[in-house]
Image (spheres, rainbow, N blue to C red):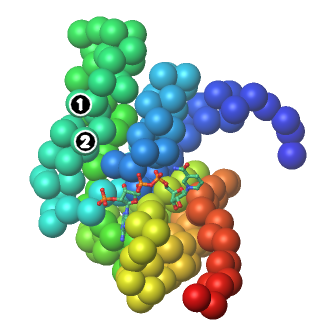
Amino acid sequence: MELTSAPQFLGAKTILVTGATGFLAKVFVEKLLRIQSDLKKLYLLLRASDHEAATQRMHDEIIGKDLFRVLREKWGADFESLIAEKVVAVAGDVSVANLRIENENLEKMWEEIDIIANFAGNTNFDERYDTAMEINTMGALHVLNFAKSCRSIQVFLHYQLKFKRYALADS
Ligand SMILES: NC(=O)c1ccc[n+]([C@@H]2O[C@H](COP(=O)([O-])OP(=O)(O)OC[C@H]3O[C@@H](n4cnc5c(N)ncnc54)[C@H](OP(=O)(O)O)[C@@H]3O)[C@@H](O)[C@H]2O)c1
C-alpha cells in the first residue's frame, strides 16, 4: 500500500461517523472538515426519529457549537453552504442491524462510503449490563457488518473504552 499523508488520503473520500454528538467524534468531525477541504461527503449517524430531527440535532449539538468557530471563520460566508453540501445527518441507531437506517438510504450509503469511524458507545460506567451490551458489543458488530456491505470500504475505525475487571474485596 502506498504511503500518503492522512489529509491526502482523506481527499475525495466519503466517511460515516457514528456517535457524532459525542465528545470524541465532534472533535474528529471538526478536524476532518478543517484539514481536508476536498472531503467528498460526511455522513453523521445520529439517534433521531427521522431525517429532519437528525438534521436539527446536527445543527444544535455539533455544527452550532463553539468548537466549530475556527472553521466558521475560515469558511466565512460559505460555511452554511459547504456544510449543506458536504455533511449529511442520518437518523440511526447502532444497536439495531443496518443501524436502523431507512432502506431507501442504505444502497446509496453502501455504494458511497470509503471510511467508517465508529465512536457510538454507552459511556455510563454504571449502565445496565444488557443496555451496555446492546450498544457497546452488538453495536460494534452491527457497524462492522454495515462496513462489510460497503463496496469500497478502505478503513474501519472503532473506538472503545477498555474496562478493567475489578475484584470486589470482601467487606
Ligand atoms: N472520551 C475518552 O477519553 C475515550 C477514551 C477512549 C475510548 N473512548 C471510547 O470512544 C467512544 C466515544 O467516547 P466519547 O467520550 O465521545 O463518548 P460520549 O461523549 O458519551 O458519546 C457517545 C456517543 O455515542 C452515541 N450513541 C450512544 N448509543 C448509541 C446508539 N445506540 N446508536 C447511535 N449512537 C449512539 C451518543 O449519542 P446520543 O447523543 O444520542 O446519546 C453519543 O454521540 C466510546 O466507545 C468510548 O468508550 C473514549
Residue at 67 percent across and 72 percent down: it is 164
| Amino acid type at image mark 2 | Glu
Left or right side of 10 for 71: left
Residue 95, image x, y percentages: 39, 78
Q: Amino acid at mark 1?
A: Gly
Of residue 72 and residue 159, the one placed in the foreground of this image is: 159
Q: Which mark is residue 64?
A: 1
Determine which residue is flagged by label 2.
61
Q: Is mark 2 within 8 Å of ligand 1?
A: yes
User: From this viewpoint, is residue 112 visible?
Assistant: no
Total marks placed = 2
Q: Is residue 12 above or below residue 144?
A: above
Mark 2 vs 1: CB contact within 8 A: yes
* Residue 19 shows up from this direction: yes
Write the residue at 13% across / 53% down: 52
The image's mark for residue 34 is: none
Residue 99: give x, y in percent of width and height: 38, 72
Q: Residue at x 59, y 31 (%)?
A: 11
- In the displayed structure, would residue 35 be above or below residue 49? above
Q: Position of residue 60 (x, y in %)?
A: 19, 39
